[in-house]
Amino acid sequence: MKRSFIFAILFLTGIATIFAAANVTKATARGKQSYDIESFMHAVKDDGLHTKVIKGEATRKEQKLFSAFVNAMPNNTPPKGTAESWAALTSALVQATANHRKGVTGSSEALAAAMTCKACHENHKVYPPKE
Ligand code: HEC
């Protein structure tokens, strides 16, 4: 009798732990924005985030999101290519984004150039895409 009681407690604690762990996983998946390359790329491709920013049509929130993605880029690691090339491309993008936010003349064109998909993918993306 006493033993089965202890087992019951252990069993219930086990269940509670599993539920707690599942909740934590869900919270991180839902609540926290990730600024990795893939999340940025999907915001660009699926939502046209960069186009809105370049055209000056982004909301404050979208502008902030774009800047956060861009600023995280130099610290992300691409699956391919040299560190020098990655640093050059991503710092150009960071600079172009900063100039664009400040409203520097010609900054829209510069940002569009820094966001050229092919220039970066050629060196740093593995083909075929793994979508
Ligand atoms: C500064 C570099 C850079 C620029 C500019 C860039 N990309 Fe990417 N993109 C990458 C890298 C690196 C990957 C590979 C990510 C991986 O496989 O982890 C990638 C992957 C992707 C993917 C696949 C994402 C996935 O699920 O694996 C899509 C879609 C994509 N890019 C769209 C675009 C589009 C559209 C543009 C232009 C408007 C663009 N990218 C501009 C660096 C860039």
Image (cartoon, rainbow, N blue to C red):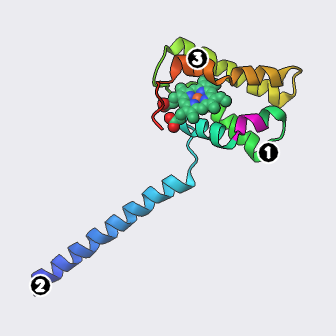
State whether residue 30 is above or below residue 90. below
- Report whether the residue tagged 3 is closer than 8 Å to ligand 1: no
**Number of the label disc, if any, that sits on residue 87:** 3
User: Where on the picture, by quarter, is residue 79?
Assistant: top left
User: Which residue position holds label 1?
Assistant: 60
Q: Crowding near pointer 3: few (<14 within 10 Å), some, many (20+)?
A: some
Q: Nearer the viewer, residue 47 or 10?
A: 47
State whether residue 32 is above or below residue 43. below
Q: Which residues are magenta?
A: 48-52
Q: Which image quarter holds the N terminus?
A: bottom left
Amino acid type of the residue that numbered disc 1 sits on in the rendered structure: Arg
- Report whether the residue tagged 2 is closer than 8 Å to ligand 1: no
Q: Nearer the viewer, residue 129 or 87?
A: 129
- Residue 57 at x, y = what percent? 83, 41
SS for callout 2: helix
Report, in whole angstroms, how far the alpha carbon at label 3 lies from the one at label 1.
27 Å
What's the residue at 65%, 19% (across, down)? 91
Tell whether position 85 is magenta: no
Pointer 3 with pointer 2, Cβ within 8 A = no
What's the residue at 49%, 53% (across, down)? 28
- Residue 88 at x, y = what percent? 62, 14
User: Which residue position holds label 2?
Assistant: 2
Please state if 57 lies on the left or on the right of 29 as rendered: right
